[in-house]
Image (cartoon, grey):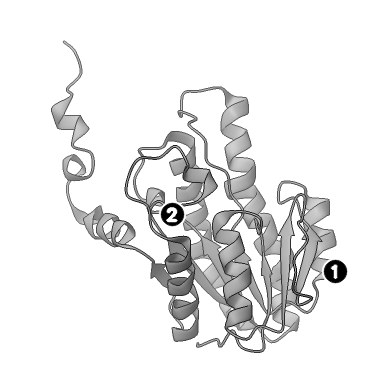
């Protein structure tokens, strides 16, 4: 299934962030007739085609209300997420906070907007993942993104009968405020979003938006020691 963004009504969650802003502006550049730019505290936009929308993905009532307002949506960019250095053995409260946004919140958006997309002819759901969906070096963040990736694979099958095309977008680090303290190589958010929309237009099911995501995905069939060299270089003390 191919989807031309031209003429689409797009909803972007987490629209205030670095990737979110690119998803909003590039959708309009590609001919979208309206973009719902959603966030917990939506900002004002200069273009009347950009519609600010209050949406807290961790609040099911908020998600439900947003779906009622944005009932003409044909493309959902499920982008909202949180980072954070929370180890798996950290507090349960901290672990749950990460999962509330990155997993339960994202799935809530998919659930509430599935009906909207179906009523509007099927449309497209783009779930924004991470190369860390496949690499467990970021504790709770990696675990939450891995769970969301698995959910996307299930959603793809569940929503296919209604004609909804479900896309998983994977990337390494993008140069956004969320990664301000990261010293690793970071991609330009504009390039990531352009690759995402190109993949949607081409009907791809999974988009590997940068070299990092390509390399990590390719390494999944290797022995664990190849993915996690620290297991070899730092053996447990006797």
Between disc 2 and disc 1, the foreground one is: 2
Q: Image point 20% across, 18% down: which residue?
A: 236
Disc 2, SS: loop
Choose the circle earlier in sequence order: 2 or 1.
Answer: 1
User: How far across and down, in percent of the image, does residue 97 sit?
Assistant: 63, 35
Mark 2 is surrounded, within 10 Å at the Cα level, by few (under 14), some (14 to 19) or many (20 or more) other residues, namely: many
Q: Is residue 198 above or below residue 170?
A: below
- Residue 120 in which image quadrant: bottom right
Q: Nearer the viewer, residue 93 or 53?
A: 53
Circles 2, 1 touching at the beta carbon (< 8 Å): no
Locate the C terminus by quadrant.
Answer: top left
Mark 1 is surrounded, within 10 Å at the Cα level, by few (under 14), some (14 to 19) or many (20 or more) other residues, namely: few
User: How far across and down, in percent of the image, does residue 29 sit?
Assistant: 59, 81
Q: Image point 77% across, 47% down: which residue?
A: 59
Which residue was labeled with disc 1? Answer: 69
Q: Image point 70% across, 77% down: which residue?
A: 117
Q: Nearer the viewer, residue 170 or 113?
A: 170
Q: Image point 40% across, 40% down: which residue?
A: 182
User: How far across and down, in percent of the image, does residue 168 sit?
Assistant: 47, 66
Q: Nearer the viewer, residue 131 or 25?
A: 25
Q: Can you tell which mark lies on residue 237?
A: none
- Residue 110 in which image quadrant: bottom right
Q: Left or right: 80 with respect to 232? A: right
Which residue was labeled with disc 2? Answer: 174
Count of residue discs: 2
Disc 1, SS: helix
């Amino acid at each position: 299934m191919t989807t031309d963004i031209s003429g689409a009504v797009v909803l972007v969650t987490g629209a205030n962030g670095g990737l979110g802003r690119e998803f909003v502006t590039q959708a309009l550049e590609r001919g979208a007739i309206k973009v719902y730019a959603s966030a917990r505290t939506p900002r004002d936009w200069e273009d009347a085609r950009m519609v600010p929308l209050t949406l807290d993905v961790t609040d099911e009532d908020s998600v439900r209300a947003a779906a009622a307002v944005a009932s003409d949506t044909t493309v959902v960019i499920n982008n909202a997420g949180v980072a954070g250095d929370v180890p798996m053995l950290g507090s349960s409260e901290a672990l749950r906070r990460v999962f509330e946004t990155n997993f339960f919140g994202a799935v809530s958006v998919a659930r509430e907007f599935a009906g909207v997309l179906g009523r509007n002819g099927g449309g497209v759901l783009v779930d924004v993942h991470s190369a860390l969906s496949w690499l467990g070096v970021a504790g709770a963040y990696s675990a939450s993104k891995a769970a969301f990736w698995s959910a996307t694979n299930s959603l793809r099958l569940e929503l296919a009968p209604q004609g909804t095309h479900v896309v998983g977008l994977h990337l390494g680090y993008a140069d956004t405020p969320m990664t301000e303290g990261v010293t690793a190589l970071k991609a330009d958010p504009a390039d990531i979003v352009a690759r995402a929309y190109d993949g949607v237009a081409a009907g791809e099911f999974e988009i590997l938006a940068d070299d990092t995501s390509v390399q990590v995905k390719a390494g999944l069939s290797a022995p664990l020691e190849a993915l996690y060299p620290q297991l070899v270089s730092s053996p447990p003390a006797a």
